[in-house]
Image: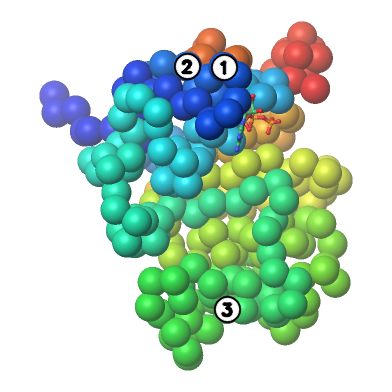
Amino acid sequence: MTQTAPLIEFSAVRKAYPGSRGDALAGLDLSIGRGEFIAVLGPSGAGKSTLFKLIAAIERPSAGQVSVGGQDVGRLSRAAVPWFRRKLGLTFQDTKLLNDRSVLDNVILPLLCTGTYGDEARARGRAALDKVGLRQYEKALPATLSGGEQQRVALARAIVNRPAVLLADEPTANLDTVAAERIVQIFSDFHRLGTTVMVATHTPAILAGVATRTIRLTDGRLVSDLPYAPPSVADIAELN
Ligand SMILES: Nc1ncnc2c1ncn2[C@@H]1O[C@H](COP(=O)(O)OP(=O)(O)OP(=O)(O)O)[C@@H](O)[C@H]1O
């Protein structure tokens, strides 16, 4: 039987931020295959965002190795980083949308970073907005949209490069159930098309029927790695 190489691999990864006490990640080994949908759980400060930042080359490991698609992320040159990031779509709880630019201009920003401009960029931006159901708002300023719609704009920006991996850091925090379910449905659609998805969340119940695996971090360590199962009452208490 042939075994395919993992898409994302952490080998003995330690991350200490300059000036901070303790490690944000403390010797993490983790392998993620193509097509997985992973719920990343853990209390505040457990290292979930740091995990995503290392995958996306926003931060570099203090020790150990992070590889994505066979590339050693910690060794990418500064010039190579924007090209590497085309493989990845990232969203954050704070959507980081620019409020002085239209929704469409926000969505096409990642294309401009890697040399796709003009009509082609706009066509791809509109296609991404179609996928999240917001094409009608392309000319609006982000601040005029609801929180759920702003998260969907951020998601359109994340997928505009048709990434192989989607990383979402607390994408449904502060959203009502309907808005959160709509976001999760979009993740599910991408997952069905073959995208590898990782979602950090304090409310894993929203990923029921969608996530395939749950990893749980505490104090920068992997404390469990299991097939996804809906959270128990004790889990919910711990995560909130
Ligand atoms: N830029 C930074 N500088 C210094 N310390 C940091 C920085 N970013 C994160 N940390 C610290 O690293 C640890 C892990 O933080 P991280 O944001 O990865 O956790 P998290 O699980 O995503 O938390 P939350 O659920 O609150 O978003 C925390 O102790 C945090 O204070």
How far is mark 3 from mark 2, CA to CA? 41 Å
- The amino acid sitting under disc 3 is Arg
Disc nearest the viewer among 3 and 1? 1
Residue indicated by mark 1: 22
Return the mark for residue 86.
Answer: none
How far is mark 3 from mark 1, CA to CA? 44 Å
Characterize the local packing of mark 1: few (<14), some (14-19) or many (20 or more) Cα atoms within 10 angstroms.
few
On-image quarter of the N terminus:
top left
Measured as percent of width and height from the top left, residue 103 is found at 69, 75
- Taking the image as shown, residue 215 lies to the left or right of residue 201, namely left
Residue indicated by mark 3: 126
Q: Secondary structure at mark 1?
A: loop
How far is mark 2 from mark 1, CA to CA? 9 Å
Characterize the local packing of mark 3: few (<14), some (14-19) or many (20 or more) Cα atoms within 10 angstroms.
many
Asked if marks 2 and 1 touch (Cβ < 8 Å), the reply is: yes
Disc nearest the viewer among 2 and 1? 1
Residue lying farthest bottom?
A: 119
Residue at 29% across, 53% down? 77
Measured as percent of width and height from the top left, residue 234 is found at 77, 9
Circle nearer the N terminus (3, 1): 1
Q: Is residue 192 visible?
A: no
- Taking the image as shown, residue 75 lies to the left or right of residue 228, namely left
Characterize the local packing of mark 2: few (<14), some (14-19) or many (20 or more) Cα atoms within 10 angstroms.
many
Residue at 49% across, 68% down? 110
Residue at 42% across, 22% down? 14
Residue indicated by mark 2: 26
Quarter of image, res 44: top right
On screen, 117 above or below 214? below
Q: Secondary structure at mark 3?
A: helix
